[in-house]
Amino acid sequence: MPKLSVIIITKNEENHIKQCLASVAWCDEIIIVDCGSTDNTVELCRHYTNKIFITDDWPGFGPQKNRALAKATGEWVLSIDADEQVTTTLQQEIKQTITHATESAFRIPRRSRYCGRWIKHSGWSPDYVTRLFRRSCANFSNDLVHEKILLQGNIGTLKTPLLHYSFESLEEVLEKVNNYSSANAQMHYAKGKKSSLSKAILHGLWAFLRTYLLRAGFLDGREGFMLAVSNAEGTYYYYLKLLFIQDRTYALTNEK
């Protein structure tokens, strides 16, 4: 079987990282790039790998994953998040796939949890993520959040899902809504995107309707409604934060 490297970026992931690393301990190489964890994350990682690299800054998800990718030495790379796990069935499919593959990369279906429930609709299922690729054929976009794989070559699709323990509590949901909406606003402001209060309201409302009605979130019960609300909040606050960045920049410019 060709050599397989796993790359994971971390910061304060002690609640997830042990299970994640145990699920990929069969791989040839595990690369950790940590952004200043203040909990037990790094110590837990040392039980599974000595290839741990600490960074002093946070350039965003895309650049940080490229840092991890640059440390990998395998012909194939599996990029997973600290709150994801590879099942035994997926492990076997990955091994068989990279042994005989002609493609450059593979999408993997992902099953995600939201506050204790596996989500089957709401735009979260089916959810395909490109995580397995030839090291020589791919890198990550330089986006602060929602980074993408920039790929040269053909892409295939695996059958076995990757497990994603995304949100186990409302506190995690609220923290991510806040962090991601801020990063999204900064990133899109730098790209010249504009916002307004009406955009914040309308896009937030549309995010709820799309998740709950068009993507059948109502079939996910109570958690489906909660997910639709948190999607709406994230969208609303993203546009609102973008508006405030605009206003603040405009005010500073006019003061000069």
Image (cartoon, helix red, strand yellow):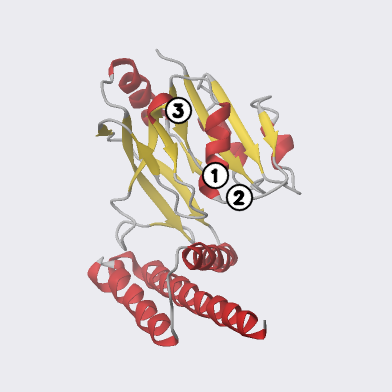
Residue at position x 32%, y 19% in the image? 96
Residue at position x 25%, y 73% in the image? 213
Distance of label 1 from label 2 (alpha carbons): 6 Å
> Could you tell me which quadrant the N terminus lies in?
top left
Which residue is at the far top?
Answer: 1
**What residue is pinned by disc 1?**
63
Distance of label 3 from label 1 (alpha carbons): 16 Å
Q: Quadrant of residue 178?
A: bottom right
User: Type of residue at label 3?
Assistant: Val
Q: Are marks 1 and 2 in contact (CB under 8 Å)?
A: yes
On the image, the x and y values in percent for residue 187 come to 50, 62
On the image, the x and y values in percent for residue 176 come to 55, 63
* Label annotation for residue 17: none
On the image, the x and y values in percent for residue 94 come to 36, 26
Q: Nearer the viewer, residue 89 or 80?
A: 80
Q: Earlier in the sequence, mark 3 or mark 1?
A: 1
On the image, the x and y values in percent for residue 93 come to 33, 26
**What residue is pinned by disc 2?**
59
Mark 2: few, some, or many residues within 10 Å (few <14, many ≥20)? some
User: Type of residue at label 1?
Assistant: Pro
Q: Secondary structure at mark 3?
A: strand
Residue at position x 62%, y 34% in the image? 32
User: Type of residue at label 2?
Assistant: Pro
> Could you tell me which quadrant the C terminus lies in?
bottom right
**What residue is pinned by disc 3?**
77
Q: Nearer the viewer, residue 106 or 119?
A: 106
